[in-house]
Image (cartoon, helix red, strand yellow):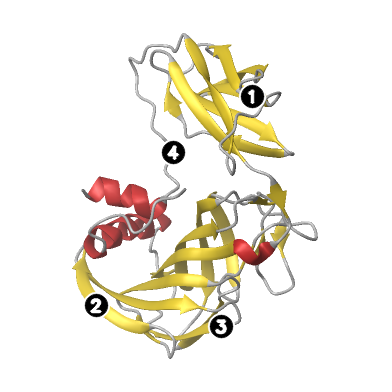
Amino acid sequence: MRRSLLAFFAYGVAVACSGGVAAAQEVRGAVLHGETGRPVPGVEVRVLGMEAGAPPTEVVVRTDARGGFRARRPGQRRTVVVQATYRGVVYSSEPQRAQGDLVVTLRVFETTTDPRGLYVARRATLLEPGAGGLLVREVVVLGNSLPRTFTGQGGGTVRLPMFAGAQDVQIIRGMAPVGTDPSGALVDTLPVWPGQRPVVLAYRLAARGPALLELPVGLPTLALDVFAAEPLQVSSEVLRPREGRQVEGRHVVRLTAERLPPNVVVRMRVWGVPQPSATPAWAAGVLLGAVCAAFVARPLLRAG
C-alpha cells in the first residue's frame, strides 16, 4: 500500500525494468484521432527501445491507410515506448516491458493556442525544514479540458508559479522549462494534451524566523493541499486546517483549499523555520512518501 501511494504522490518514478524479460518480437497498433476516434493514416511512428546504461534504439514506420502500424522490436532492450508525431506534437505511450508481442494504441489531437481549457486539477505541496530555510516538494497535476492539444503562446505553453524566492529548482518530471518569466513562474515548452499531466518539482526557500510565503495560483485550481512537517506551523486566510497525523515519528498538518481562481495569491505565515541544519535532501523525499501514505487512502487523481 505504501509503495503504491508513494508512486502516486511522486508521479515521477519511472517504470522499473527487471531482468529476465523476453524481448518483444513485434510492436503493432494504431493511431486514432482523439476527438473523432477515426484512424489517422500517414503518421510517423517511432518505436523506442530503452534500457538503463544503454543508448536507446529506434525503429521508424508510418501508419497505413487504416491508421495501423507494425514494426520489429527495437533491439535488445527491456522497455518499449511508442511515439507518434501529429501536427508537430509528439504523443507517447506509457513505457512497457518488452515481453512478447506488444499492441499499442495512440491517440492524437488537433492543436490550439486557446488557454481557456487549462487548469490545475490538484497541487500537493510539502514544506520541510531545511538548511537555512525550507525545502519544498510539489506535485502539480495540470489539466486541459479542451479536446485539442494546447501548444502555447509567446514562446511557451504553461506558466507554473512557485513560491516567491524559489531557489535551486529541480524538475523531476513533467516539464521542460526554458526558464522563468518576470514574475518567477516556470515557463514550460511541452504541449498540454487533453486530459491531465503530472509535474513533480522541488526547490528551496531561504527563510528565517516567522516567514511570509506567497504562492500565486496562476491557473484555476480545483484543489490545493499543503503539508507542513514539524516543527513548522502554518496559518493562512485561504487555507483551512484539515487534520494532523504522526508520520515517521513527526507531526504533519494538512491544510487545504478548493476551487481557487487564477488571480488569487495564497499567503502563508510559517513559524518554526530552524537555523541552518543538516537535514539531507533524501529525508524530505522519504517523508513525502510517508505523508501520502498517512493522509491518502486511495489515489487522489489519475493522470490522463
| Residue 225 at x, y percent in the picture | 39, 71
For the residue marked with disc 4, what is the amino acid? Ala
Q: For this view, does 248 lie left or right of residue 138?
A: left
| Residue 35 at x, y percent in the picture | 59, 44
- Asked whether the residues under the numbered discs 4 and 1 touch, taking CB atoms below 8 Å apart as contact, a structural biologist would say no
- Judged from the image, the secondary structure of the residue bearing numbered disc 3 is strand
Q: Residue at x 65, y 21 (%)?
A: 63
- Mark linked to residue 45: 1
Q: What's the CA distance linking mark 4 and mark 3? A: 33 Å
Mark 1 closeness class: few <14, some 14–19, many ≥20 residues within 10 Å: many
Mark 2 closeness class: few <14, some 14–19, many ≥20 residues within 10 Å: few
Q: Which numbered disc flags the more N-terminal residue, 4 or 1?
A: 4
Q: Nearer the viewer, mark 2 or mark 1?
A: 1
For the residue marked with disc 3, what is the amino acid? Val
Q: Is residue 52 visible?
A: no
Q: Is residue 164 visible?
A: yes
Count of numbered marks? 4
- Residue occupied by mark 3: 265
Q: What's the CA distance linking mark 3 and mark 1? A: 43 Å
Q: What's the CA distance linking mark 4 and mark 1? A: 22 Å
- Mark linked to residue 14: 4
120 in relation to 21, above or below: below
Q: For this view, does 270 lie left or right of residue 174?
A: left
Q: Which numbered disc flags the more N-terminal residue, 4 or 2?
A: 4
- Residue 64 found in image quarter: top right
- Asked whether the residues under the numbered discs 4 and 3 touch, taking CB atoms below 8 Å apart as contact, a structural biologist would say no
- Residue occupied by mark 2: 243
Q: What's the CA distance linking mark 2 and mark 3? A: 23 Å
Q: Residue at x 44, y 65 (%)?
A: 122
